[in-house]
Image (cartoon, grey):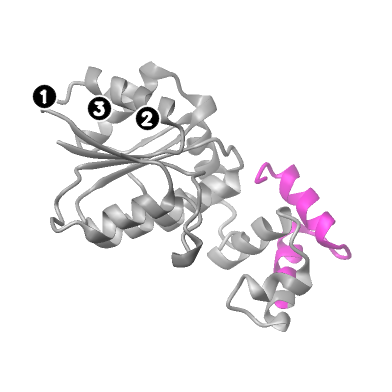
Amino acid sequence: MEVLIIDDHPIQIDGYKSILSLSDINEFLNITACYNCEEAYKIITTSQNRNHFALAVIDYSIPPYEDQNIFNGQDIARLMQMYFLETKIVIITSHTEAIVLYNILKKVNPQGLLVKSDIDGEELLDAFSEITKGNYYFSESVKKAKKLLISKEELLDTTNRKIIELLAQGIKTKNLPTHLALSQSAVEKRKSIIKDVLGITKGNDEDILREVRKLGLL
C-alpha cells in the first residue's frame, strides 16, 4: 500500500509510520513523506500513476506554497482529490474551533478528520484501520462541531464562514474584498445577514465575533 504523509515535523511523521505499521492492514506499506506544501504539490502533480496513493495523511498547518496559492493542508487535500480520485484522505489538525472544522468537512469531505488534542496512539490506530476499510472516522471535537453547525446552515454558508474566519484573524472589513471574490457592498450585505442571524441589531466586528464565540463556533 502506497501512503503519503505530509507534516512539517519529522518526529510526527515517524509516529504515524509506527502506528500504521501496527495496524491490521495486511499489506506492505511504502510510505512517502514530505514536509511542506511545495513538496506535496510537486509529488502530487508530477505523479504518473493516478492510483498511486491509497492513503494520504495530511497535517492542516504546514508551510505554504504561495506561488501556487496553497496555504495549508486543506488546500493540499483538495489538490489531492483532483489528481487521485481513489485516495482516502485523513486531515489532522490542532484547531478545535467548530467553524474551522466545519469548513474542512464542507470543502474537503475527508474520510478522516482528527483533532490532535482528542486522540492518542490507540485511537489513531483505530482511525487508520476504519478508514482503510472504507469507513469515515471523525474525532470527538469534529463530531460535536458537525452536530452544532448543521443547525446553523443559514449563518454558515461558505462565504459567511470565510468572512467570520477573516474577521477572527484581525482582517478589517475594508480589506475583506481583497481576500474574497466580493465587492465592498456585497461584504456589507453579508455582514448584515450574519448580524441578523446572530440577533445583533447594532454592533461592530467585535460584536459579531463575541456572539460567534458564545455559540462555540470560534
- Neighbor class of circle 3 (other Cα within 10 Å; few <14, some 14-19, many 20+) is some
Q: Earlier in the sequence, mark 1 or mark 3?
A: 1
The CA span between labels 1 and 3 is: 11 Å
The amino acid pointed to by label 3 is Ser
Q: Is residue 149 above or below residue 131?
A: below
Residue 186 in percent (x, y) is at 68, 80
Q: Nearer the viewer, mark 2 or mark 3?
A: 2
Q: Quadrant of residue 134?
A: top left
Residue 78 in percent (x, y) is at 37, 58
The amino acid pointed to by label 1 is Asn
> Which numbered marker is on residue 26?
1
Determine the residue positioned at 50% across, 62% down. 66
In this rendering, would 207 be left or right of 158?
right
Residue at mark 3: 129
The answer to whether residue 109 shows anywhere in this view is no
Q: Nearer the viewer, mark 2 or mark 1?
A: 2
- Neighbor class of circle 2 (other Cα within 10 Å; few <14, some 14-19, many 20+) is many
Q: Quadrant of the N terminus?
A: top left
The amino acid pointed to by label 2 is Ile
Residue at mark 2: 13
In this rendering, would 184 be left or right of 5?
right
Q: Is residue 8 above or below residue 168?
A: above
Indicate yes or no whether the magenta region holds residue 214: yes
Element type at marker 2? helix
Element type at marker 3? helix
Q: Nearer the viewer, mark 1 or mark 3?
A: 1
